[in-house]
Image (spheres, rainbow, N blue to C red):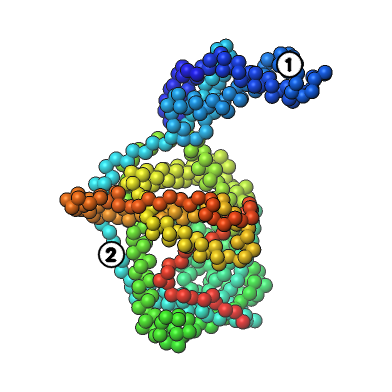
Amino acid sequence: MTIIEKTLREDHQAYIVAEFEPEVWENYKRKATKKLGERVRIPGFRPGKAPLEMVRRVVGNEAVEELAIELLVDEEYGNVLTAAEVSPGAPGRLEDIISRDPLRLAFTVPLEPVVELGDYRSIRIESETPTVSEEEIEDYIENVLLANSIAEPVERPVQEGDVVYVKYQWAILESDNQSAEFSAPESAEYIVGRKTETERPFPGFSQHLIGLTADQEVTIVHDYPADWEDETLRGKKVAYKITVQSVKELHIPELTDDFVKSTFTDLNSVDEFRARVRTVLESNQRARADADLAEKMLARIHERATFKYPPQLIDEEIQRQLARWESELQKYGLNLDSYLRITNKDAQTFVNETVRPEAIKALERRLLIDKLIAQENIQLSQESYQRALESLAGELSQLPKREQKRLDNRRISAELERRLTNELVGELIERLKAIANGQLDQISAQAENEGLPSAETVSEKVEPPTPESSPEREDTTEAVQVEPNTVESNPETSEASET
């Protein structure tokens, strides 16, 4: 086989023309004729036993050559890539059959993405020092008390502070105040009057529930401002059809030493509890500050980076984004088609204006992170691997026995791989912090002076587990459902009980 032409296109794909030797072409035609002979019935011969020339006369040269090209492409495509010296980034395709004598085939091959980072190590961003206010401490304590409160059903209208369970539907009103199709019912729970500024579907929603009773229905209209975060609702009038399901009075415990002792086994007083809360909040703020710093670094690095990738990768990411949209809409009893009808959007316009920009952003972010991990030679430490393995094992052990039996090696391995990837990203965040603060240069210079390994080579690589190391499980098509890790230092809280 000989590469006749190789052209690198502007869309980061390679156009390759390969010519195959006559004997190779004849060999695949013989293979195709033999396969076709097993499929057709020729009088006087058992399937697959008729002479090849007779089979060829019966089925025709065109059918033989079409199957021969299919077989050849399946078996020789990898050799074409090797001979053309190209690294694919996605599956290629047979573009054209240029000639059959000699056999010349044209392929279009999406190339492996290329990311050039630029001088990212010179970027400096000042870290923020986390501070915890008394208001934040009180808010956290209030959440703990609410989690340990008792909700008691009452036969009266809704009052401030009650827990109210509702179902509601929404529809955008047209210019003549006629509503479009209402959405499927959504369930929600509110503590009336508490944190109204963060309520969904809009701030102050629970105030409309005051005075209603269980099983009562009401319809309200809300005018969304022109700068609302959801562009589909900006400046729109939206009707909400609300049904109150139940009303409960909330009995919140007092914060006393006895409450602390009964709720947290390792704490003995309110003062100890407040100290623990401060520690937890400071830890959470440091984690958020680190994440914010990493996001700023990634944004700055992205500005200096250049990306080259084929359009197929965008198309794949668009499909992933659409799947995410479908998954999110299902939580509200909708699918993508009903969402598009409600918002009066055309499917292709929605993809072009909303989904495609999200897909490009997600794709380039993933490529950027992968490149940084490789560029910085970040590898999993033994501690990181062990942490991911133990967290997965611990959470799987909490699943009901029936759910454990339905897990299989593939899904367990996929979940472990996701956690190991998160560990890698966590170590990348630490590296980005060191770069942003200028500490990495200091560490590398000190290590060079002392003859020690540099910051890029101190991590110990850990090989992933082999399939044999996981227990045998019954195969299933359901995804592993594992809740995210909780912060270990968080005070333990229990769910609100009901009477």
Mark 2 is surrounded, within 10 Å at the Cα level, by few (under 14), some (14 to 19) or many (20 or more) other residues, namely: few
Residue at (33%, 52%) from the top-left corner? 459
Position above or below: 283 against 12: below
Position above or below: 181 against 137: above
Residue at (45%, 27%) from the top-left corner? 82
Labelled disc at residue 51: 1
Q: Is residue 235 visible?
A: no
Labelled disc at residue 322: none
370 and 143: which is toward the camera: 370
Furthest residue in direction left, as rendered: 449
Viewport quadrant of the C terminus: bottom right
238 and 66: which is toward the camera: 66
Q: Is residue 315 visible?
A: yes
- Quick one: SS at disc 2? loop
Residue at (52%, 40%) from the top-left corner? 316
Position above or below: 269 against 350: below
Q: Which residue is mark 2?
A: 129
Q: Is residue 449 rendered to the left or right of residue 435?
A: left
Q: Position of residue 27 (x, y in %)?
A: 60, 18
Amino acid at circle 1: Pro
